[in-house]
Amino acid sequence: MQYPQHTEPLVRLLGVTKMYVQPDNYDILILDDITLEIRPGEFVALLGPSGSGKSTLLRIITGLSAPSFGTVLYRGRPVAGPNPHAAMVFQSFALYPWLTVLQNVELGLQAKGVPLAERHDRAVKLIDLIGLNGYEDAFPKELSGGMRQRVGFARALAVEPELLCMDEPFSALDFLTAENLRSELLDLWLESKIPTRAILMVTHGIEEAVYMADRIVILSKNPARIVSDMPIALPYPRNRKDPAFMQIVDTVYKVVTGWNDHPHQSSVADLTEPKSPDRPHLRPIPHGHLSMLSGLLELVADRGGRDDLYHLGSELFLEVDDLLPVTETAELFHLAEVKEGDLYLTDLGHQFVEADVSERKEIIRTQLHDIPIFRLIDRVLQSKANHAMVKEFFNDILEEHFSVEEAERQLMIAINWGRFADFFHYDTDTELLYLADDQLLSSQDVVQDSE
Amino acid sequence: MALISLLIAWATRAPRPHPEVGKISLSFWRLPVYALYSWLRMAAAYLISLLFTFVYAYAAAYNKRAEKFLVPLLDILQSIPVLSFLPVVLLAFIALFPGSRIGVNLASILLIFTGQVWNMVFALYHGLITIPRDLRESALSLNLSPWQRFRSLELPYSMVGLVWNSMMSWAGGWFFLMAAEMFSLGNKNYQLQGLGSYLQTSANQGNWTAEIAGLLILVLVIVLMDQLIWRPLLAWADKFKMELVEGDIRARSAVLMILRRSRLIEWLGNAVLSPLLEWSDRWFGVKLPAWRRKSILSSIAGLLRTLILAGIIVGLITALEGTWRLFEHVSGAQLLLVFEATGATLLRVLTSLAISVIWTVPVGVFIGSNRRWAKMLTPISQIAASVPATALFPGLVALLIHVKGGLSTAAILLMVLGTQWYVLFNVIAGASAIPEDLREATKMFRLKGIRVWTTLVLPAIYPYLITGLITAAGGAWNASIVAEYVSFQNHVYTTFGIGSLIAEASTSGHFPLLLLSTAGLAAAVVVINRLIWRPLYNRATKRYSLS
C-alpha cells in the first residue's frame, strides 16, 4: 500500500488524555496527550506493552468511551457516542451465544434498519466471503476458536465500516489458526474485497504488527504516550524469514524495550508527587513470575551470559508482552540488564544461576529490601507488636498510587515474591501478612537503616 | 388521580351483587373450576411480577442514584412476610371497589405478587449488572437501539436466571395459596373461590375425602405446569447459557422437541414473530429517539419526573408520619414481646434447618454420587418438592394438635417440609460436582469412612450447602406466619412466635403491633443475612470452591 499524504484524514486525535478519577483525588493517568491521524488506505498497528492503555485508546477512537480531555474527530466532525462508520472486532470474539452465526452477522444490519430480505442476502454473502458457508445455522459454541473469530470479522464487516478496529483479534487463537486468519484478512484488505477504508489494530505482538501493518504506532506505559510512529515500507506479501523483515522486527523490539532504559520518565508516583511532595515514591513492580525468571536466567547463562531479546522471545514462544515483565524483574533484582534489545547477566545474575534453591531465595530476599513496596510492608510488620497486619491495610495504601485493580495485582505479586523469598508469611484465610521469629531478626537491621 | 377517581366512580356505579364471602362448595365437580380460578389469579400475579421486575431491575441496574436505595430496599422488602402486606392491600382495594368481589380478588392477586416478585427482580438485576463488558461494547459498537439491546442482549443474558426464579416464584405462590384465598381482617372474613380455600374449608370441616381430592388436583396442576411449561422453558433457556463449550448434561424436554419440529410453530415464527420483531425494531428503534429529541416532550417528561419525585417525597413523609403515629401506641412491653417472639421463631427456624441438614446431607451425597440413582430419584424428588407443604399442613395439625407442644412441633415440621428441598437439591448438585480425580485420589490414599467425609465430601459440598441453607432459612422465616397460627375445625390455634404475632395482629387489625412485629421479623432476617450468611457464603466460595 502506498502512503497517501494529501488525503483528508479519517480520524484525528488531538491531545487525547484519559484519567481514571479516584475518590481520594489521586487520579490515575492512562493516556497522556495523544495526537494521531489515521488516513484512508492505512493499516495502522497500535503496539504497546500490556496495561499501556492501547485498548482504551481504541475505545475512545470508536466512540465507546469518551476522553477526559482532548478531541476525537471523524472526517472533521467530533465523535460523540459509538461511531456508526466504525466496527469493532474483539479479542474474546464477543459473539452472542444464543444467536446463530447468521443472526450474529445480521445484528449490525438490523440496527441499521436494513429490511429482512436484503439483510439476509448481505449476511449470507459475507459468510461465504469469510469462509463459513454451511455454518449459517450453527451456534457459536459449536464452532472452533478460529471460526468464531471469523464470525466476529463477518459481523464487523457486515455494516460495511469505513474504519475497522480490531482489539488483539488473533491473540486468543492458536498459532496456526491465527496465521491463517491473518493472511486471509490481508488478502481481503489488499485486494479491496471489502469496502473498508482503514484498519486500526491493537496488538502486543511485534511480529504480527510488522507482518500486517503499513504503519506502527508504539505506546509507552504508565501513562501511554506515543514513543514512535514508523511506516513499514515492506511490500506484501511479507516473508518472516526475509532479512529486511527481521531487521524491522529487531528495530521495533529495541524501541519497545528501549523506553525501559529510563524508568524515571513516566511512573505513576511522579505524577502524584506534585500534589504532596513528602509522599514516598511507590514505583510499580513488574508482573514477573519468579519461576520464569530462574528459567530465563539459566537459558541466558547457557548462551554465554547475553542474548538478543527478540531471539529469546521467539525461541520461548513468548510475546514481548510476556517476556518484558520477566526481564524487568531481572533488572529490578540487579540480576540482568537490557541494552539495545539484548539481555546481559550481571555478576549477581551469574551467582544466582550457580546457586541452589535456598541460596537463590537468600539473594532475592536481600534484593527485596531495596524495593519500596517491600520496605513499606517490612516497616509496618516490624513496628506492630504482634508483627502482623491485614492485607486490606496495604491494599488501601497501594490504592493511593495505583488503580483499584492494579493495586490488587501489585499486592498479589508482592505476596507471591515475599512468600518465595521467605520475606514474610501470608495466611489466605485470615488475610494477614505476618513475620515469623526468624524473619524478625534479619529485618530488624533494615528498619534501623531506613530510619 | 383523575384515572383513579374514574375507576372508583365506575366501581361504585356498578356494584356487583356478589357478597364479599364467596361460598365454597365441597362438591368434587367444582374442583376443576376452582383450580382454574386459582391458576388465573397466580398467572395474573405472575404477569404483574414480570412487569414490575423489568421496571425495577432496569432502574436499579442503570441508574446509579436509584441503585443506591433500590437494592437495599429490595433486601428489606424481600424479608417482609406476605401476610404483613395483607391489611394495607386489602383495605386499599376494598376502598377502591366497595361491595364487589373485584377488590378482594385484586387484593389476593397483589398478595401473591408480593410473594413472587422479589427473587425475580434480584435475578434480572443480577443478570443486567453481570453482562460481560465485551458483549455490551459490541452491542454499542453495532449501534443497536435500546430496544434491540434489550431483546438481543439483556433479556437473553438474564433468561436462565429469570426462568429458574419464575419457577421458584410459582412454587412460593402455591405455598401461600391458602393464605392468599382466605383471610380475615378485623372481624370480617374474606373468602375467594379457589383451590386454596377449598383445601382450607375441607380441613376446617374435617372432610378428609375432599381434602385429599383437592390435594390430588393441586398436585396434578403442578405436575402439568412442570411438564408443559417449566421443563420446555428450561430446555429452551439452555441456549442462553453463557458457556462456549457444550455442557455434558443438557436439559431436555420432549414437549419442546415436538414444538420445535412442528410446522405450526415454524409458520408462526416466519409469519408472525419475525415481522413483529421487524416492526418493533422500527417502532422502538427509529421512532423513540425521534420523539425524545422534541423539546416539548422532554420538558413534559421532566415535569413528570419532578411530579413523580414530589409524589414519592410526599408519600414518604406521610408514611413516616403514619409510622410515627402508630409507634406512639407501642409500649415497652410490646417491644419486649416482639423481641421474645422473634427469638422463639429463630429457635424454630434453626431446628428446622438442623433437621433438614441431618437427613439431606447423607441422602443428597448418595444421590449425587451415583448417576444411576440420580436418574431415578431426581424426578421423584422434584415432584415431591413441588407439592406445597401448606396443603399437607392441616393433616399434620390434626395429628399433633392434641399432644402437648403439638403445634410448635407441627410448625417446625412445616418449615422442614417447605424448605428441605432447597438444601437437598443443592447438596445433590454439590456432590455430583466433585471431580472424578479427587475421588480417585481419595481411594488411592485408602481414606475410609469419616476421613473421606472430612477431607473430601464435606468441603466439596460446603458452598452448595450454604447456598441451600440461605434459601431455606428465608423460606422458613416466611413460613412461620402460616405455621404458628392455624385455624382448624373452626378453632384458632397459635403457638408463641413472631409469625403468630404478625398473623394475629393482621387478623385483628392491630396496626401498631403489625408494623412493629413485621419490622422485627424483617430486621432479624436482614441482620442474620448480613452478619452470618453472607460472610459464611463468601468464605465458602473463596476457600472451598472447586474451580
Image (tube, coloured by chain):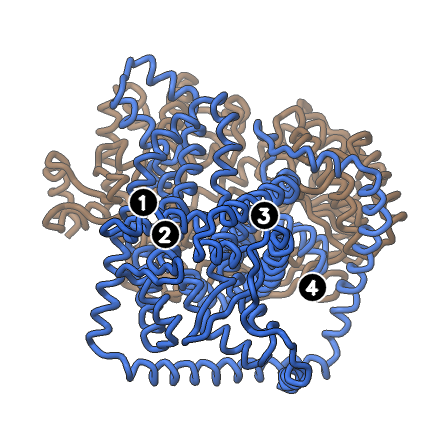
Chain colours: A brown, B blue
The residue singled out by tag 2 in the image is B476
Estimate the spatial distance between the alpha carbons at disc 1 and disc 2, rounded to whole Å.
Answer: 8 Å
Disc 3 and disc 4 on one polypeptide chain: no
Q: Quadrant of residue A112?
A: bottom right
Q: Chain of mark 2?
A: B
- Which dot, 3 or 2, sits closer to the camera? 2
Answer yes or no: do the residues labelled 3 and 1 have beta carbons within 8 Å? no
Whole-angstrom CA distance, mark 4 to mark 1, is 58 Å
Is label 2 in a helix, a strand or a loop? helix
Which residue is label 3 attached to? B163
The circle drawn on residue A79 is: 4
Q: CA distance from mark 3 to mark 1?
A: 26 Å
Question: Picture quarter containing residue B494?
Answer: bottom left
> Which quarter of the rendered picture does the C terminus of chain B lie within?
top left
Residue drawn at x 68%, y 85% as measured from the top left: B13
Labelled disc at residue B458? none
| Disc 1: which residue | B353
- Residue at 21 percent across and 38 percent down: it is A424
